[in-house]
Image: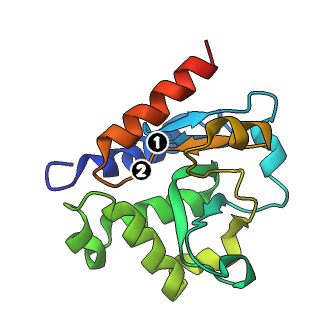
Amino acid sequence: MENRNNNWCSYYYILDVLQKQNKKYNYVFYIDSRCFLCNHSKLIESWLVNDKNIYIGLDPTVKYIKRQSNPKSVKTNVIIFKNSEWTIDFLNFIINEQTYSPFWKIKNGYETAFRKILAYNYCNIIQNISFIKDFNFNNYSDNIIYYIHNGGWVLSLTDNQDETSNETIANKFIKINK
């Protein structure tokens, strides 16, 4: 980890959990620290609509993304990983493959690496991934009440440098959930 941005630690931890827990968990739900779980009545299992190894949301800022058969613009801040040999192999690949070393020190470099793996279908990822095309799975919204009341599940803060905007959204979310 010493040569990487701290965002990569999540993949190391997920891999560790999958390898050392003797299949104790069927799935590992990863949620970034800049996200809020909004809809507590919707179960994680409701997103597992087919037998895939990774369940991931799409980036709604990409025009026509729902029409693409292999959308490469995914949001890696919320992922459901199945506890499988394929997932363990995939995480080892993304962590150790030297091709992705230019992204190791960049903030969100893990997302760039993930998208490149999708683009070239390394590890047969396309056959092992479920693209969640419902933007309520994971999205950014400054209209929190509307997002939550319309089925929003995970609310993501933005990655831009506008910390004031993120703080405002976070405070609104906290106020709503008191």
Q: Nearer the viewer, residue 109 or 58?
A: 58
Q: Label 2, label 1: how many angstroms apart (C-alpha)?
A: 11 Å
> Split into 4 quadrants, where in the image is the C terminus?
top right
Q: Residue at x 47, y 31 (%)?
A: 170
Measured from the top left, where is residue 77 in percent x and y?
A: 49, 51
Classify residue 15 as left or right of residue 177: left
Classify residue 136 as left or right of residue 21: right
Measured from the top left, where is residue 163 in percent x and y?
A: 31, 41
Mark 2 neighbour density, 10 Å: few (under 14) some (14–19) many (20 or more):
some
Q: Amino acid at mark 1?
A: Asp
- The earlier-in-sequence mark between 2 and 1 is 2
**Which residue has dot 1 on it?**
32
Measured from the top left, where is residue 78 in percent x and y?
A: 56, 49
Q: Residue at x 72, y 51 (%)?
A: 136
**Which residue has dot 2 on it?**
11
Measured from the top left, where is residue 33 in percent x and y?
A: 43, 36
Whether 132 is drawn above or below 32: the answer is: below
Whether 123 is drawn above or below 32: the answer is: below
Q: Residue furthest left?
A: 2
SS for callout 1: loop
